[in-house]
Amino acid sequence: MIHIEVNRVNGDYGFEAKDAAGHIARMDTSPETGGENFGIRPMQMLLMGLGGCSGIDIVSILKKQRQPVEGFRMLIDGEREAGKEPSLWTNIHIIFELKGDVDPDKAYKACALSIDKYCSVAATLKAANASITWEVKVAPSDKQQASS
């Protein structure tokens, strides 16, 4: 069983969540709804979790295939249901940007395996009817660019 502790520590809506290892995440609501920008909005944290979960999967898959990932960035955009409570994620788009001497076909397959099979966060969001689309961009390593 996983144990998380969440405590209010700042103003009305500023919370800190701590896992059993002592890692801390700060959360708050927007100033428009009474928050103080103390931390991440909880719904944004879901998208961050999607990026982390998928990123770990993709790097693990590519390492097993001996693909040298020198850099990795994900750009994640999401849309939520308008005028509903709760307001769930409906559309999420991810751009996976990998850098290195990575075979683009292997990068694409690793991303597909993560989003469609391995990433628990993606599966959780899909179970709530979120549509997740994505694309992959592979840039050559700095070493490749310097020798060109």
Image (cartoon, rainbow, N blue to C red):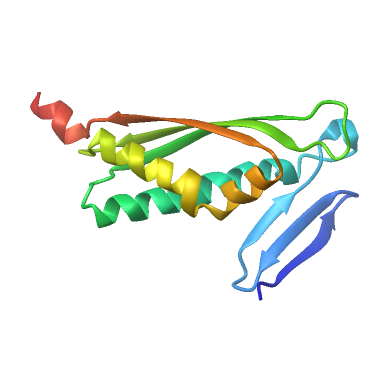
Instruction: Determine whether 121 is above or below 98 in the image.
Output: below
Seen from the viewer's position, the closer of residues 82 and 10 is 82
One can see residue 41 in this view: no
One can see residue 123 in this view: yes
Residue 22 place in picture, x, y as percent = 62, 70
The residue depicted at 79 percent of the width and 45 percent of the height is 28
The residue depicted at 82 percent of the width and 58 percent of the height is 9
Residue 135 found in image quarter: top left
- Single out the residue that lies furthest toward the bottom: 1
Instruction: Determine whether 32 is above or below 128 in the image.
Output: above
Residue 82 place in picture, x, y as percent = 82, 26
The residue depicted at 47 percent of the width and 36 percent of the height is 74
The residue depicted at 78 percent of the width and 29 percent of the height is 81
Instruction: Determine whether 51 is above or below 105 in the image.
Output: below
Instruction: Determine whether 84 is above or below 8 in the image.
Output: above
Residue 31 found in image quarter: top right
Q: Is residue 43 left or right of residue 14?
A: left
Q: Is residue 62 left or right of residue 36?
A: left
- Single out the residue that lies furthest toward the left: 147
Residue 138 found in image quarter: top left
Residue 24 place in picture, x, y as percent = 65, 60
Residue 17 place in picture, x, y as percent = 72, 61
Q: Is residue 54 left or right of residue 82?
A: left
Q: Work out which quarter of the rendered image holds the N terminus and state it.
A: bottom right
Q: Work out which quarter of the rendered image holds the C terminus and state it.
A: top left
